[in-house]
Image (cartoon, helix red, strand yellow):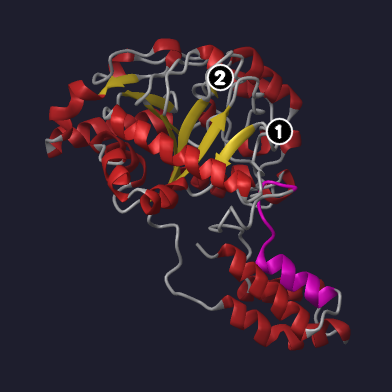
C-alpha cells in the first residue's frame, strides 16, 4: 500500500493528524485499463472479469499465475476491488444453499440467538455466523457443489498465497434495511479507535495483507437492493484505520462512493482496508442475501499451541499478591499479562460470543486484568475463564 505522505516520525497513526486532502488525492484517480488486460472492463473503477472466459486460463498454471498477479496488483496498489462475474455458475447449488441458510436463520430465530453485528444496527438484517461450517454440516453435498469454484480459490490465493483459511458469514438484508457506516475491516477495523492507535504504523500496513474480504451474491442485486458501497483506491491511504471514524472522511465517502449491481453467482473481492459499507435496501421485494467471505492468511497463527487458560489460573495468585503488596507496578503487570493471557478476541464462536456493545468480544487478558485489579477469588476467575473458553468453542 502506498501514499505520498511517509510514515509519521512517531511511528504511530493518530486520527487527529489525518488529512482529508491527502485522502482525496489518493482516491481521485481512475483505473488504467492497460494494467488489467484480463478484465472485460472497469465500470465505475471496479475491474470486472468474465469467469467463463477465464476458465481455460485458470486451468493452466502459468496463465493462472498471470491472472492472480493482476488481481493482487488491483488489491494492493490499484482500485482495491474487483468482481468475478459468475464465479459460482451453478445456480442450483446457490439456491440449495440459500434454502439451507433460510432454515438455519429460522431455527436460530426460534432459539433466540444473539443478533449482534459489527457495523449495522441489530435487527436490521439476519446474520448467520460461521455459515461455512453450518452449511457443511447441514448439507455436505451442497457445500461441495457451492464451493467448487476455481475462480474463488484463485482469488484467495492471489492475495494470501496457498493454504489460506476460509470463513464465511451470511448477511440477509430485507427491504427497508438501512445502510452501514463507512468502515475498514478485519483485523484493525474491528478494534476501537483507541486500541487501533496503539499498534505501530507498520502494523496498519500489515493488517490488510492478512485477510481478503469477499462476497457471493445469492440473488440479483440492482443498486436499489443495496449492494456494497465502495470507494476505489481508498485502501491506499495509509492512516485509514485511524481516519475512517472521522465525520469528514465518512462524509467524503458518502459523497463519492460507487455501487455496482451484481447478479446471482457473482463474487466481489476487496482489500479489507478499502472504505466500504453495505448499502440501504430501498427495494420493495428483494431480500438481499450475500455470503460474506473473510479469508485469512495461513501465517496468522503462532508456532506453538499454548494452554493459556491453565497459565492464567496458575499465575493469578502471584499476580494478585504482587499488586496487593505494591510489588508489581502497572507497567510490570501489563508485561506479565501480555506473556500470559490471550489479548485478542478472535477466533471465536460468534453465535455464543458475539460483539455485543462493541466491535469485538471481551478477551481473556481483560478478564485476568479485571480479576487481579479487583481482588477476585481463584474460583471466580476460573469460572470466568472456563465460561469464555466454552463460548469460544466451535
The answer, for residue 226, to whether it is visible in the render is yes
- Which residue is under mark 2? 226
Left or right side of 168 for 321: right
Label 2 environment density (alpha carbons within 10 Å; few <14, some 14–19, many ≥20): many
Q: Secondary structure at mark 2?
A: loop
Q: Nearer the viewer, mark 2 or mark 1?
A: 2
Compared to residue 394, the image places residue 195 above or below, namely: above
The residue positioned 65% from the left and 20% from the top of the image is 176
The answer, for residue 239, to whether it is visible in the render is no
Look at the image and say whether residue 32 sits in the magenta stretch.
no
Residue extent of the magenta highlight = 357-373
Q: Which mark is residue 281?
A: none
- In x, y percent, where is residue 285? 55, 16
Left or right side of 268 for 282: right
Compared to residue 234, the image places residue 315 above or below, namely: below
* Upstream in sequence: badge 2 or badge 1: 2
- Which residue is under mark 1? 245
Amino acid at each position: 500500500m502506498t501514499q505520498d505522505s511517509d510514515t509519521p516520525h512517531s511511528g504511530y497513526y493518530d486520527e487527529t493528524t489525518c488529512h482529508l486532502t491527502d485522502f482525496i488525492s489518493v482516491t481521485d484517480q481512475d483505473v488504467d485499463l492497460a494494467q488489467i488486460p484480463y478484465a472485460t472492463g472497469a465500470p465505475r473503477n471496479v475491474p470486472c472479469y468474465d469467469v467463463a472466459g477465464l476458465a481455460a486460463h485458470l486451468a493452466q498454471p502459468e496463465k493462472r499465475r498471470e491472472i492472480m498477479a493482476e488481481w493482487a496488483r488491483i488489491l494492493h496498489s490499484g482500485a482495491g476491488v474487483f468482481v468475478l462475474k459468475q464465479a459460482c455458475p451453478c445456480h442450483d447449488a446457490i439456491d440449495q444453499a440459500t434454502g439451507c441458510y433460510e432454515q438455519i436463520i429460522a431455527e436460530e430465530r426460534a432459539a433466540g440467538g444473539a443478533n449482534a453485528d459489527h457495523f449495522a444496527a441489530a435487527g436490521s438484517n439476519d446474520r448467520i455466523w460461521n455459515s461455512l461450517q453450518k452449511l457443511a454440516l447441514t448439507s455436505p453435498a451442497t457445500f461441495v457443489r457451492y464451493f467448487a469454484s476455481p475462480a474463488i480459490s484463485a482469488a484467495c490465493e492471489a492475495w494470501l498465497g496457498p493454504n489460506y483459511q476460509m470463513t464465511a458469514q451470511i448477511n440477509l438484508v430485507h427491504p427497508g434495511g438501512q445502510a452501514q457506516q463507512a468502515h475498514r475491516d478485519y483485523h484493525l477495523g474491528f478494534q476501537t479507535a483507541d486500541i487501533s492507535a496503539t499498534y505501530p504504523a507498520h502494523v496498519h500496513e500489515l493488517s490488510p495483507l492478512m485477510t481478503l474480504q469477499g462476497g457471493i451474491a445469492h440473488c440479483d442485486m440492482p443498486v436499489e437492493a443495496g449492494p456494497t458501497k465502495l470507494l476505489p483506491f481508498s485502501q491506499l491511504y495509509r492512516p485509514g484505520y485511524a481516519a475512517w471514524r472521522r465525520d469528514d472522511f465518512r462524509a467524503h465517502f458518502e459523497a463519492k462512493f460507487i455501487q455496482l449491481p451484481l447478479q446471482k453467482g457473482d463474487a466481489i473481492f476487496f482489500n479489507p482496508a478499502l472504505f466500504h459499507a453495505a448499502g440501504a435496501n430501498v427495494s420493495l421485494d428483494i431480500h438481499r442475501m450475500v455470503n460474506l467471505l473473510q479469508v485469512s492468511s495461513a501465517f496468522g497463527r503462532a508456532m506453538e499451541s499454548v494452554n493459556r487458560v491453565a497459565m492464567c489460573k496458575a499465575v493469578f495468585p502471584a499476580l494478585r499478591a504482587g499488586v496487593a503488596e505494591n510489588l508489581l507496578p502497572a507497567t510490570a503487570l501489563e508485561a506479565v499479562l501480555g506473556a500470559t493471557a490471550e489479548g485478542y478476541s478472535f477466533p471465536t464462536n460468534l453465535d455464543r460470543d458475539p460483539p455485543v456493545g462493541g466491535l469485538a468480544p471481551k478477551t481473556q487478558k481483560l478478564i485476568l486484568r479485571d480479576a487481579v485489579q479487583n481482588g477476585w477469588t481463584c474460583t471466580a476467575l476460573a469460572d470466568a475463564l472456563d465460561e469464555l473458553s466454552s463460548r469460544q468453542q466451535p
